[in-house]
Amino acid sequence: MIEVLPVSAFKDNYIWCLIEENRCTVVDPGDAAPVMDFLNQRSLTLTDILITHHHWDHTDGLDGLLKHHRDINVFGPVSDNIPQITHSLREGDSCSPQGLAESFEVLEVPGHTLDHIAFYNQHVGLFCGDTLFSAGCGRLFEGTAQQMYDSLQKLAQLPDDTAVYCAHEYTLANLEFAAAVEPDNSARQQHQQWAQQQRQQHRPTLPGNLGLEKRINPFLRSQVDGIARNVSQHSDKTLSNAQQVFAEIRRWKDNF
C-alpha cells in the first residue's frame, strides 16, 4: 500500500511524497530542505524523484537532494532545461520507480510549459504538476490555449475516481473565479464551503477528485451552455465552440 503525503514548500507548493515501507519517491521537489526534514523525521530512504516540468519551484531542490542521495532515479520529461534527469519520458512510456511496487503511465500535457508531463496510476492517482488544479488550470507560459485545452481533455478521460495530486494550494482562489464564471453551480458552492473549512484548519484541499473537477472546474466545462453564454457576455465576443470558450476563460482568469 502506497501512502501519499504532501510536504509544504514556499508559499503554496506541495511536494508529494509516495511512501512504501521505508522507501520514498518524491514528486517535483522545488526545495530540498523540507524534503530532507521529512525523510529524516520518518526515517525514509529516498529512492526516486519524479519531475513534471522545468519550472524552478518544481526542480530547484534536485541538486540538494542528489548531493545526499546519489545514483537515484530522476524521471522527467524530455527537456534541455533539467540536466539532472536520468530517465527521459514521453507519451505512453511507463515509469517504474524502484522504491514502489506500482508503475505510472506517462502523459504529455503541454500548455503551461511545452515539456510538461503527468504521471498516472489507477490505484494511486494522477500527479499533474501545474496542468490541472482544483477548480483551475495552469497559466499558459509556453503553450497555446489549444494545447492546454487538449491536455485537459486528455486528463478528463481518466476515471472519475482518480485522485488529482496537483502542485499548488490554489483552490480557494480558483473557486472564487469559478463562481464568477458559473455562479449557480451548486456542486461548486458546496465544495467551496468545504475548502474554506479545510484552509481555516490549515489542512490541504488536495488531492482533488477528477469526477468532482468535471462538475466544478470551469476549464473542464467550456462545453456547458451556461458557461459559454457567461463567457461570451464577459468577453463581448461570439464564441462558436468549446475551444474558443476555453481560451476566453483562461484570458479572463489571467486578469481576474
Image (tube, helix red, strand yellow):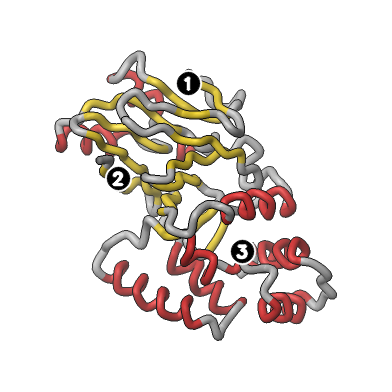
Quadrant in which residue 255 is drawn: bottom right
Direction from residue 198 to residue 244 in the image, left or right: right
Spatial separation of the CA atoms under disc 1 and disc 2: 24 Å
In this rendered view, identify the residue nearer to me: 33 or 73.
73
Q: Who's the residue at 19% across and 30% down the image?
A: 22
The residue type indicated by label 2 comes to Val
Q: Secondary structure at mark 1?
A: loop
The residue type indicated by label 1 comes to Gln
In this rendered view, identify the residue nearer to me: 121 or 23.
121
N-terminal of the two: label 1 or label 2? 2
Q: Nearer the viewer's eye, disc 1 or disc 2?
A: 2
- Tell me the number on the disc at residue 84: 1
Position in image of residue 247 (x %, y %) = 73, 61
Q: Secondary structure at mark 2?
A: strand
The residue type indicated by label 3 comes to Phe
Position in image of residue 251 (x %, y %) = 69, 63
Spatial separation of the CA atoms under disc 1 and disc 3: 33 Å
Q: Residues within 10 Å of mark 2 (few under 14, many from 20)?
A: some
In this rendered view, identify the residue nearer to me: 92 or 169.
92
Q: Who's the residue at 65% across and 47% down the image?
A: 111
* Mark 3 lies on residue: 219
Q: Residues within 10 Å of mark 1 (few under 14, many from 20)?
A: some
Q: Nearer the viewer's eye, disc 1 or disc 3?
A: 3
Q: Is residue 122 above or below residue 228?
A: above
N-terminal of the two: label 1 or label 3? 1
